Image (tube, rainbow, N blue to C red):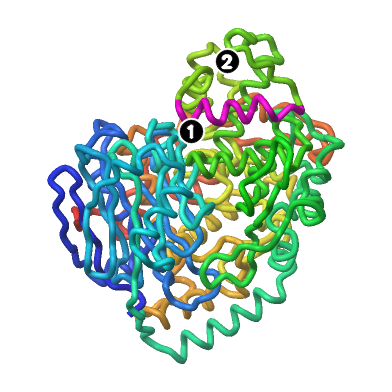
């Protein structure tokens, strides 16, 4: 079947390797991917276990549909306790790595312990080895990938690796696969680095079996047709995620100058259209992707020259290294993106940490001397390129910024209201002042301020799922927002468990259920698959409560509550109202955050022991 039921269990301290067989009922309840990773880690994560301690577990998981030919379903997740936020860490990545793991006969990898020396994990179907990575330590991610492919003698080997940032335990270090696809944001690269694990190289030759070929192919064909007709999907094909930048600037969904400015004349210069007219070379596709929103770019000559064709910046990166520091130099932003990928840094968290430094120097709270002689002038990306390297190696000002803006702000004595983060994670470039429901999404996300856990802005723009009660709501309206965000969170939890791209908008969720049932043989419909999403989201909350989560932290900093000019029209969210409605809808206690006994019982979450 499309699911193998097998998890590779690795203890890097004892160097033991085992195969764990999972009960099929777990897939009926948690689907796979992020959902199953949450179920595996729930009984093992506790507040007393530090994220970077040897005993802290780390899970790689391919989604239930990864490895099949279901359209836009080739993703994987990496999960652990986040060293950035201290709560649930979940990083999602596209490319080919997840599908390759499934083709090797595995649904996931469960790792604990710490190797005495740098190592990497090599998987060729049933042939699994922990190998020496001493010569790879210190190398960039692309060089690591090139070396491991050469050693394997097979260019189809897929590599997920860390760069120097992960080795130096930068709290938002990313794991890079397929030379530019990133599992970023929550610091999974640092968790790998703490275990002396440089990379996981996978090659699979097995063909996955489809349980019900007729049902699967019918659903697949319909979804392909719907993707082809979808305006947003076609825009992303033509212009990448950067194609949204112009609209984001107009509506105010993209703010500028470290979230303090509503308009900026330079936004078009860094848009998807400008990229296609200048440095773009071709599209980049994940496995079974029909959109190709990835960009391959090249800067030829000059101080921002790239070494040939490399992955180009996506929307969020253009926000963090462009809009946030008022840089309209697309070539410079492309260079920043390249450096982050090579060194293994999340571009959102890294870019916002650097913009934070610009903001502090502008406000007189960070002197040029304290910045190591760097003059951080709005619009000038050159100091940012220096800081990227300093962060990766924990040098100079980078030593402070490497811990994320919350820790950096605390060390520098910055008031909390000027730190653009929620629950430890820097806010991305979808403004809660432009789409008021985004405030609730950020406040209740299980991994800190994250636009991927609901993508409320996308639904508000006109991407509903009406058959499961997810309707378009005016972006400045707050009535009905709580139910919409909660249902979207449940649905996105399903997508992250299937390995389905969040940009896909199927006409019905029954179609999604048919894909899953056809691939796995596990009976599912829209109602039952959405209940899986509710179960996963509720278990996320239980994990975070075990890790010391407090509802008092569910708030936006003051810097995001100041009215701006431009597309937001001076609006700010009433988050407290949204939270009251949200907790009522979820049937969770507003003060403690604890789900009711009835909710726990209804979702079969009463007693969850270890499954690995």
Q: Position of residue 337 (x, y in %)?
A: 61, 42
What's the distance in space between the residues labelled 1 and 2, CA to CA? 15 Å
- Residue 233 sits in which quadrant? bottom right
Dividing the image into 4 quarters, which one contains the N terminus? bottom left
Give the residue displayed 35% in from the left and 72% down from the top.
Answer: 103
Looking at the image, residue 227 lies above or below residue 542: below
Instruction: Give the side of residue 110 with respect to residue 452, left or right.
Output: left
Q: Which residue is under mark 2?
A: 415
Q: Which residue is drawn at 59% across and 44% down?
A: 338
Question: What numbered label is drawn on residue 260?
Answer: none
Circle 1 sits in a helix, a strand or a loop, which is it?
A: loop
Q: Residues within 10 Å of mark 2 (few under 14, many from 20)?
A: few
Q: Which of marks 1 and 2 is nearer the N terminus?
A: 2
Identify the residue at image location x=59%, y=14%.
371
**How far across and down, in percent of the image, does residue 385 sit?**
62, 30
Q: What stretch is highlighted in magenta?
A: 379-393
Report the front residue among 593 and 61: 61
Rendered-image quadrant of the C terminus: bottom left
Q: Where is residue 490 in the image (x, y as percent from the top left)?
A: 48, 58
Please indicate whether residue 276 sits to the left or right of residue 517 in the image. right
């Amino acid at each position: 079947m499309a699911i193998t039921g097998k998890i590779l269990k690795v203890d890097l301290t004892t160097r033991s390797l085992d195969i764990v067989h999972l009960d099929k009922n777990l897939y009926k309840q948690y689907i796979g991917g992020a959902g199953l990773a949450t179920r595996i880690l729930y009984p093992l994560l506790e507040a007393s276990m530090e994220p970077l301690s040897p005993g802290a577990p780390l899970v790689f998981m391919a989604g239930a549909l990864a490895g099949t030919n279901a359209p836009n379903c080739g993703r994987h997740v990496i999960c652990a306790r986040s060293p950035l936020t201290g709560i649930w860490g979940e990083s999602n990545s596209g490319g080919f790595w997840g599908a390759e793991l499934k083709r090797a006969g595995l649904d996931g990898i469960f790792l604990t312990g710490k190797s005495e020396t740098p190592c990497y994990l090599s998987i060729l179907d049933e042939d699994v080895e922990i190998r020496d990575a001493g010569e790879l330590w210190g190398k960039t991610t692309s060089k690591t990938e090139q070396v491991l492919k050469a050693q394997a003698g097979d260019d189809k080997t897929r590599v997920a690796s860390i760069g120097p940032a992960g080795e130096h335990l930068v709290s938002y270090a990313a794991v890079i696969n397929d030379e530019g696809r990133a599992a970023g944001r929550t610091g999974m690269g640092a968790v790998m680095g703490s275990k002396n694990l440089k990379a996981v190289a996978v090659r699979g030759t097995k063909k996955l079996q489809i349980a019900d070929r007729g049902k699967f192919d019918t659903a697949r064909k319909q979804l392909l047709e719907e993707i082809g007709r979808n305006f947003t999907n076609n825009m992303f094909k033509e212009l990448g995620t950067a194609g949204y930048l112009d609209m984001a600037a107009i509506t105010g969904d993209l703010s500028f100058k470290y979230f303090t400015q509503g308009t900026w004349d330079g936004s078009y210069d860094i848009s998807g259209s400008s990229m296609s007219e200048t440095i773009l070379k071709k599209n980049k596709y994940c496995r079974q992707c029909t959109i190709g929103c990835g960009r391959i770019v090249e800067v030829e000559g000059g101080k921002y020259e790239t070494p040939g064709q490399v992955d180009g910046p996506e929307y969020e990166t253009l926000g963090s290294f462009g809009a946030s520091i008022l840089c309209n130099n697309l070539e410079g932003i492309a260079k920043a993106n390249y450096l982050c990928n090579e060194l293994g840094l999340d571009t959102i968290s890294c870019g916002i940490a650097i913009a934070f430094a610009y903001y502090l120097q502008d406000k007189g709270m960070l002197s040029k001397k304290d910045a190591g002689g760097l003059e951080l002038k709005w619009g000038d990306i050159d100091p940012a390129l220096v800081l990227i390297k300093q962060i990766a190696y924990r040098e100079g000002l980078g030593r402070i910024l490497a811990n994320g803006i919350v820790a950096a702000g605390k060390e520098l004595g910055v008031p909390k209201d000027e730190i653009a983060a929620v629950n430890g994670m820097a806010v991305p470039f979808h403004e809660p002042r432009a789409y008021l429901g985004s405030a609730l999404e950020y406040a209740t996300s299980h991994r800190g301020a994250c636009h991927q856990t609901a993508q409320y802005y996308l639904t508000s723009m006109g991407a509903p799922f009406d058959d499961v009660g997810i309707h378009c709501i005016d972006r400045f309206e707050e009535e009905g927002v709580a139910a919409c965000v909660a249902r979207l969170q449940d649905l996105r939890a399903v997508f992250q468990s299937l390995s389905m791209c969040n940009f896909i908008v199927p006409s019905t969720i029954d179609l999604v259920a048919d894909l899953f049932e056809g691939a796995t043989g596990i009976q599912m419909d829209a109602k039952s698959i959405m209940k899986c999403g509710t179960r996963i989201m509720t278990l996320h909350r239980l994990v975070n409560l075990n890790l010391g989560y407090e509802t008092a932290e569910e708030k936006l900093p003051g810097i995001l509550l100041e009215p701006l000019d431009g597309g937001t029209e001076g609006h700010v969210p009433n988050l407290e109202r949204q939270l009251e409605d949200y907790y009522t809808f979820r049937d969770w206690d507003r003060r403690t955050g604890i789900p009711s006994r009835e909710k726990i019982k209804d979702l079969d979450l009463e007693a969850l022991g270890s499954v690995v």
